[in-house]
């Protein structure tokens, strides 16, 4: 099939590699900032903003690719739910961190959030690679790969809910204080 030629494969591999590198640099920049003692409030707020830019670009594009390639409705629905859950979690956490900042709370990213993000980059890359290559292989290879995509998406959704709970627990007292003042 001409749609899945060398150019498509090369672009998918390059995109996946870039996602992996982006995930690594996202983890390293915070570690280096702490090590070199150059942590700033702007950095604490801009790092999650860039994560959101990644999610807003990568996940809807994955959903579009799934639909474009005629993937199953189940995979399209799973990716749609995945995308919505990510966006809702990030919106809520941003709100909670903003409320916390009104009370001078430490708004730095928490480890569970960093792990979630660090795994999201290569996780998205894995799904991209699947979409680029699975039609080139027999079903005996393609089905396990699709199952691995569901597993990656499932683990990332679990991490998303876990991090949602952690951030909510930490910032809930600040939200309660803000509601009393309201």
Image (cartoon, grey):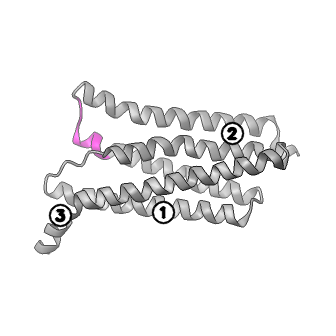
Quarter where residue 172 is shown: bottom left
Residue at the image point whose x is 23% and y is 59% from the top = 171
The disc at residue 41 is: none
Residue at the image point whose x is 50% and y is 57% from the top = 157
* Helix, strand or loop at mark 1: helix
The C terminus appears in which quarter of the rendering?
Answer: bottom left
* Helix, strand or loop at mark 2: helix
Cβ–Cβ under 8 Å for marks 2 and 1: no
Q: Residues within 10 Å of mark 1 (few under 14, many from 20)?
A: some
In the depicted structure, whether residue 9 falls above or below residue 181: above
Q: What is the spatial separation of the Cα atoms under label 2 and label 1, in whole angstroms?
A: 25 Å
Q: What is the spatial separation of the Cα atoms under label 1 and label 3, in whole angstroms?
A: 24 Å
Of tags 2 and 3, which is closer to the observer? 3
Which residue is identified by label 2?
12
Of tags 2 and 1, which is closer to the observer? 1
Which residue is identified by label 3?
173
Which residue is identified by label 1?
85
* Helix, strand or loop at mark 3: helix
Residue range highlighted in magenta: 38-45
| Image coordinates for residue 80, horizontal then vertical, percent | 59, 63
Quarter where residue 16 is shown: top right
Quarter where residue 115 is shown: top left
> Farthest residue toward the right?
1
């Amino acid at each position: 099939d001409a749609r899945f030629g060398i150019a498509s494969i090369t672009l998918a591999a390059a995109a996946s590699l870039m996602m992996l590198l982006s995930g690594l640099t996202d983890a390293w920049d915070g570690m280096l900032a702490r090590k070199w003692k150059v942590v700033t409030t702007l950095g604490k707020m801009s790092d999650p903003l860039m994560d959101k830019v990644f999610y807003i670009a990568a996940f809807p594009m994955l959903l579009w690719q799934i639909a474009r390639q005629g993937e199953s409705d189940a995979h399209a629905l799973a990716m749609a739910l995945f995308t919505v859950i990510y966006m809702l979690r990030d919106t809520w956490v941003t709100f909670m961190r903003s409320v916390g900042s009104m009370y001078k709370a430490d708004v730095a990213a928490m480890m569970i959030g960093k792990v979630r993000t660090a795994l999201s980059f290569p996780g998205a890359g894995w799904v991209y690679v699947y979409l680029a290559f699975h039609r080139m292989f027999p079903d005996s290879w393609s089905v396990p790969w699709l199952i691995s995509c569901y597993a990656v998406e499932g683990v990332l959704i679990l991490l998303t809910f876990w991090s949602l709970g952690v951030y909510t627990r930490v910032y809930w007292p600040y939200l309660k204080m803000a509601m009393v003042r309201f």
